[in-house]
């Protein structure tokens, strides 16, 4: 990633503006394509740019407040809403066309009656989006681009001003939004709760949009983004079935008033099909996002937040030797980690391959120092480079399973090493003086603090 594209270390006011301008550009670049009826992705790309832009304007409202006004945010929100009717109708049209292929012959009259109505709504919605909506956007875009092009910083003579970094502010936002996701998730008790499901999807989307811009800068973010997209998709599809249900109910009223018996029977069949799809999707949501899996996921998000909050790549952690992996941790998902150390005396360079639910990723890391406070510089690399360098680590390798568990505001990392009876756990903190409170359930497993015992450093465990 180029220095121009990096956001983490920039002043938060600058980073937020650069990110907002990036998404404003994405939406703007889609505008000329909307005139081409054969470009089926143009409206989708326009909507995505708007959604991401709205998310930045909302999340970093404080960092943008000196130049970006509430009216600017409201205009973008109104423009985004102007594209909803066409998109909702398109989703319904695709669903109806798929049901037409599988419906019994006797039920197809209702689908055939409803299809042209939904198609007409889609075309009207898209025509509005391509015309009036984009016209409003052109005016709003010029004003917003100007307001995003600068920010004010007041400095009193003789004082030094320390601006919070984009990474620090994003870390706080990640913790806040992860908490929102937990709260919204807990409010969903069954598939009929349309508002709660929609709010949970919005919480997932906002958290995803916070993570996406830093996925190339921080290890592990790409996998979290992928999982959030899966969550957003399944909840979005459940929401779509709620919208389909409302459309079918309205159509049924019209069909009944017109005494269209065959059409009514077809609409009833569609209503049952929508309910079946909704319940199937909800079961998938329950399976993939149980409370235990959500807690593990949030633990990973908080670990990312801790990484972002660090300045100058300083790592402060405590390490403990355990008798075994705690029972409660065994239920959590884990990553399989293979890491090896390249030959060198002054510089310690580590290669790492991580396999987990999000796939396979590769990293190069340089570390300096020992004990509780260390400097760590890490970047993601390619599979090809990893394969070329990996043979050089022969005789200095470690293989382990890593579990990450959120406990309150803290994140505990557990490593189970292959080939030896050894379990270690770590917690990163923001200060050397921070008092560590070991969870009650973990205490029986702790042998001692080994932070300063070099024999438990991974490089010394490697063989």
Image (cartoon, rainbow, N blue to C red):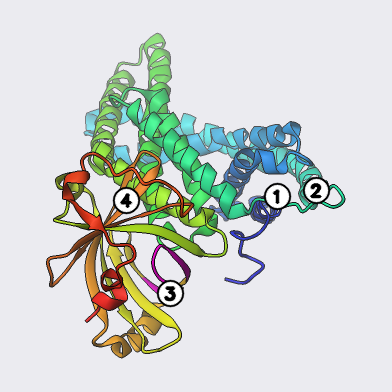
Image quadrant where residue 367 sits = bottom left
Please identify, in this view, whether the residue under mark 3 or under mark 1 is nearer the observer: 3
Q: Which of marks 2 and 1 is nearer the N terminus?
A: 1
Please identify, in this view, whether the residue under mark 2 or under mark 1 is nearer the observer: 2
Residue picked out by circle 4: 412
**In the image, which residues are magenta?**
362-376
Label 2 CA crowd tier, 10 Å (few <14, some 14–19, many 20+): few
Q: Earlier in the sequence, mark 1 or mark 4?
A: 1
Q: Is mark 1 on a helix, strand or loop?
A: helix
Is there CB contact under 8 Å for labels 2 and 3? no
- Give the farthest residue toward the right: 157
* CA distance separating discs 1 and 4: 31 Å
Image quadrant where residue 19 sits = bottom right
Q: Earlier in the sequence, mark 4 or mark 3?
A: 3
Q: Where is residue 308 in the image (x, y as percent from the top left)?
A: 51, 55
Q: Position of residue 43 (x, y in %)?
A: 58, 47
Please tell me which residue is depicted at 34% across the width and 74% down the height of the picture. 352
Q: Is residue 206 left or right of residue 188?
A: right
Residue picked out by circle 3: 365
Residue picked out by circle 2: 153
User: How many badges with numbers are in the image?
Assistant: 4
Residue picked out by circle 1: 13
Q: What numbered label is drawn on residue 144? A: none
* Towards the viewer: 58 or 456: 456
* Towards the viewer: 100 or 194: 194
């Amino acid at each position: 990633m180029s220095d121009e594209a990096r956001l983490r270390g920039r002043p938060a006011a600058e980073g937020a503006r650069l990110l907002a301008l990036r998404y404003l550009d994405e939406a703007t670049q889609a505008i000329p394509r909307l005139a081409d009826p054969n470009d089926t992705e143009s409206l989708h790309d326009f909507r995505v740019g708007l959604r991401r832009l709205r998310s930045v304007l909302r999340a970093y409202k404080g960092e943008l407040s000196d130049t970006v006004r509430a009216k600017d945010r409201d205009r973008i929100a109104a423009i985004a809403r102007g594209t909803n009717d066409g998109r909702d109708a398109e989703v319904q049209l695709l669903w109806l066309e798929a049901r037409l292929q599988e419906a019994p012959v006797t039920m197809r009259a209702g689908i055939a009656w409803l299809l042209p109505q939904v198609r007409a709504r889609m075309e009207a919605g898209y025509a509005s989006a391509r015309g009036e909506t984009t016209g409003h956007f052109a005016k709003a875009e010029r004003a917003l681009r100007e307001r995003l092009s600068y920010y004010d910083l007041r400095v009193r003579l003789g004082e030094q001003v320390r601006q919070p970094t984009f990474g620090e502010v994003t870390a706080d936002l990640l913790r806040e939004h992860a908490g929102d996701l937990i709260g919204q998730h807990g409010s969903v008790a069954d598939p009929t709760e349309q508002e709660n499901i929609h709010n949970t999807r919005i919480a997932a989307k906002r958290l995803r949009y916070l993570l996406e811009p830093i996925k190339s800068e921080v290890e592990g973010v790409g996998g979290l983004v992928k999982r959030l997209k899966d969550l957003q998709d399944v909840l979005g599809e459940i929401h779509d079935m709620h919208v389909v249900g409302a459309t079918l109910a309205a159509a049924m009223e019209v069909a009944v008033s017109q005494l269209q018996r065959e059409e009514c029977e077809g609409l009833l069949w569609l209503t049952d099909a929508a309910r079946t799809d909704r319940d199937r999707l909800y079961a998938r949501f329950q399976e993939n996002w149980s409370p235990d899996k959500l807690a593990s996921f949030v633990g990973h998000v908080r670990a990312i937040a801790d990484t972002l909050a660090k300045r100058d790549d300083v790592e402060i952690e405590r390490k403990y030797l355990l008798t075994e992996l705690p029972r409660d941790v065994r239920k959590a998902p884990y990553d399989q980690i293979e890491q090896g150390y390249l030959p060198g005396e002054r510089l310690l360079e580590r290669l790492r391959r991580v396999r987990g639910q999000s796939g396979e990723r590769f990293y190069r890391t340089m570390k300096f120092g020992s004990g509780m406070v260390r400097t760590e510089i890490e970047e993601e690399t390619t599979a090809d480079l990893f394969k070329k360098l990996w043979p050089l680590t022969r005789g200095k390798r470690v293989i382990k399973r890593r579990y990450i568990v959120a406990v309150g505001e803290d994140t505990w990392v557990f490593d189970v090493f292959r080939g030896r009876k050894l379990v270690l756990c770590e917690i990163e903190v923001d200060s050397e003086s921070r008092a560590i409170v070991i969870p009650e359930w973990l205490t029986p497993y702790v042998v001692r603090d080994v932070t300063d015992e070099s024999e438990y450093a991974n490089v010394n465990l490697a063989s």
